[in-house]
Image (cartoon, rainbow, N blue to C red):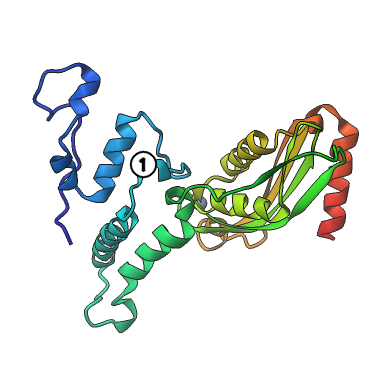
Amino acid sequence: MPDIVPPPEPTSDAGDAAAPGLSLIRSEADLAALPASERIRYRLVGADCRFHANDNISDYVRPGETEELKAEVAQHMQAVLRALVIDTDSDHNTQETAQRVAKMFVDEVFRGRYQAMPAVTEFPNVTRLNELMIVGPIAVRSACSHHMCPILGRIWIGVLPNEHSNLIGLSKYSRIVDWIMSRPQIQEEAVTMLANVLQERVKPDGLAIVMEADHFCMQWRGVKDLESAMTNSVMRGAFLKNPHLRREFLSLLSKKTA
Ligand SMILES: [Zn+2]
């Protein structure tokens, strides 16, 4: 495992007095010597690309680098266990915990940050469907960005297509939901992100999303309120303008929930 190099300080260590943006440039050899997380961060900063917890950064991760990321995360998780004064040498339960947590973060629960969007085939709306379509409930498995505690819930999606809409297969809605939720999230931002992706793909006249979820940071810690579920909705286009359509969606949804 490579030693951890201190984070680069892009503005102060470039030496060459070039234009401000160019002060970031390093040679490929310099970059290769950095931990993968620093290389990826370097590319993101260079491209002026946001990398918040719930952003997908797959365009900046090269093949093989997620393996390096896992090794780095494992190394730091080991330091966290040490800081928690857990004797991982003699406690057989925690001997592989750092590696397990690293794998869980990178390959599983936060993979929606590192993997590209699942391939989604779109079909032109040849039969000109223009009826309200509801997909759900779709299982939501996420984690809150504040505490990294699980968020478990359900989501319903209402689509009012028009003749120009692209239709996507029902199972693809679940895959897109999973891709967006497999990141540290904030529920309000998650539903907005999902709405943006679906709006762009499907181009419907109306789009409605309702998400209802349990936040384990409210149950496991903090107020320890076991009953607190959070519900968020996004209504766009026809769902915003037409109260009848909105009512139809919500009433069908409550029947499905019952
Ligand atoms: Zn939280």
When the figure is inspected, residue 226 is found, relative to residue 172, above or below; the finding is below
The one of 183 and 63 positioned closer to us in this rendering: 63
* Badge 1: residue crowd in 10 Å (few <14, some 14–19, many ≥20): some
Residue 164: quarter of image: top right
Is residue 228 among what the camera can see? no
Q: Position of residue 192 (x, y in %)?
A: 61, 38
Amino acid on which disc 1 is placed: Tyr
Farthest-out residue, left: 15
What residue is shown with label 1?
60
Residue drawn at (57%, 61%) of the image: 219
Q: Residue at x 27, y 61 (%)?
A: 71
Is 22 left, or right, of 62 in this rendering? left
The N terminus appears in which quarter of the rendering? bottom left
Which residue shows up at 21% across the image and 23% down it? 22
Residue 95 is left or right of residue 200, and the answer is left
Where, quadrant-wise, is the C terminus in this rendering?
bottom right
Front-most of 217 and 234?
A: 234
- Point out residue 146 in the picture as x, y percentages from the top left corner: 46, 48
Point out residue 189 in the picture as x, y percentages from the top left corner.
57, 40
Q: x, y (%) of residue 171? A: 68, 56
